[in-house]
C-alpha cells in the first residue's frame, strides 16, 4: 500500500467517524422534534364525570359543552449577544499566505502633460488605493503519462536486445480517469459535505 493510499484510508476513516456522529445528532434532533409535536398538537386527555352521560345528547349544563381553554404558557425570549474581536492588521494576517498580484494604475503617456502649461509631468509617487481578493474557480487539467524506453545499441549489434523502460507511477484506481486529487475531492464532497453523486456529476461538468 502506497503512502497516498494510506493517507486516503486515514481520511476515509476520519470522515466515516464524523458521518456517524452527525447521524446520531440528527436522530436525536428528530426525536426531540417528534416529542415537541406530540406535546403541541397531540390529542388532549378528556375528564369524565362520575355520572353516566350520553355521548349523543347535548347537555348545556354538561362540562363537555364548555370550550376547552388552553392553559397559559409562559413564553421566554432568549437574547443572544456577542462581540467580535477585531485588531489592527487583521486583514493582513488573514491574507498573509496568499499570492500577490500588484495592479499599477498609471497615466497614459499622452496624458502625462500639464493642462496649464503643456509641460511634461514628473512622477510624484503612488499610494495604495485598496486591497481586494479574487476567486478563481476550480478547473480540471489532463495529465498524459508517457513511459520512455531505452535500448543498448552495443548489445543490439551482437543480437541481444537489452531494453529498459521507465514505468509511470501506479494510478490510484486502475483503468480510471480519476487521479488522487479527484478521488480526495470526491470523498470530501460525499462524506463530509453529504453531496450525492448525481449533483457531483453536474459540478464536474461545470469544471470542464
Image: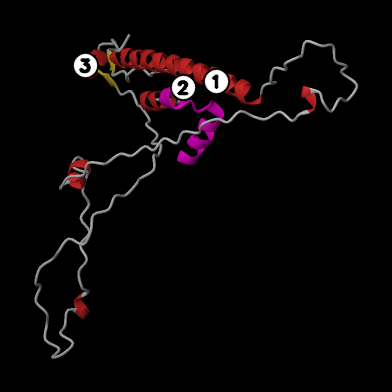
Q: Is residue 208 visible?
A: no
For marks 1 and 2, the one nearer the N-term is 1
Q: Quadrant of residue 193?
A: top left
Q: Is residue 103 above or below residue 142?
A: below
* Residue holding disc 2: 176
Disc 1 packing (10 Å; few <14; some 14–19; many ≥20): few
Q: Is residue 54 above or below residue 128?
A: above
Q: Label 1 vs label 3: CA separation? A: 77 Å
Disc 2 packing (10 Å; few <14; some 14–19; many ≥20): few
Residue stretch rendered in magenta on the structure = 187-208
Task: State which quarter of the image contains the N terminus.
Answer: top left
Residue 182, percent from left and from top: 40, 27
For marks 1 and 3, the one nearer the N-term is 1
Q: Residue at x 78, y 10 (%)?
A: 50
Coloration mode: secondary structure
Q: Quadrant of residue 44?
A: top right
Amino acid at each position: 500500500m502506497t503512502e497516498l493510499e494510506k493517507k486516503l484510508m486515514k481520511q476515509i476513516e476520519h470522515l466515516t467517524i464524523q458521518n456517524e456522529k452527525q447521524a446520531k445528532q440528527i436522530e436525536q434532533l428528530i426525536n426531540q422534534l417528534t416529542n415537541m409535536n406530540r406535546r403541541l398538537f397531540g390529542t388532549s386527555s378528556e375528564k369524565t364525570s362520575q355520572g353516566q352521560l350520553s355521548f349523543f345528547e347535548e347537555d348545556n349544563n354538561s362540562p363537555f359543552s364548555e370550550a376547552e381553554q388552553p392553559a397559559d404558557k409562559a413564553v421566554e425570549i432568549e437574547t443572544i449577544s456577542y462581540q467580535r474581536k477585531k485588531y489592527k492588521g487583521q486583514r493582513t494576517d488573514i491574507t498573509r499566505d496568499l499570492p500577490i498580484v500588484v495592479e499599477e494604475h498609471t497615466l497614459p503617456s499622452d496624458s502625462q502633460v500639464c493642462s496649464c502649461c503643456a509641460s511634461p509631468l514628473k512622477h510624484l509617487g503612488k499610494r495604495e488605493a485598496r486591497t481586494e481578493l479574487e476567486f478563481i474557480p476550480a478547473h480540471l487539467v489532463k495529465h498524459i503519462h508517457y513511459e520512455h524506453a531505452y535500448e543498448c545499441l552495443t548489445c543490439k549489434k551482437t543480437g541481444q536486445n537489452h531494453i529498459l523502460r521507465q514505468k509511470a507511477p501506479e494510478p490510484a484506481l486502475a483503468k480510471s480517469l480519476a487521479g488522487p486529487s479527484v478521488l480526495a475531492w470526491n470523498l470530501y464532497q460525499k462524506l463530509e459535505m453529504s453531496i450525492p453523486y448525481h449533483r457531483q456529476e453536474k459540478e464536474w461538468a461545470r469544471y470542464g
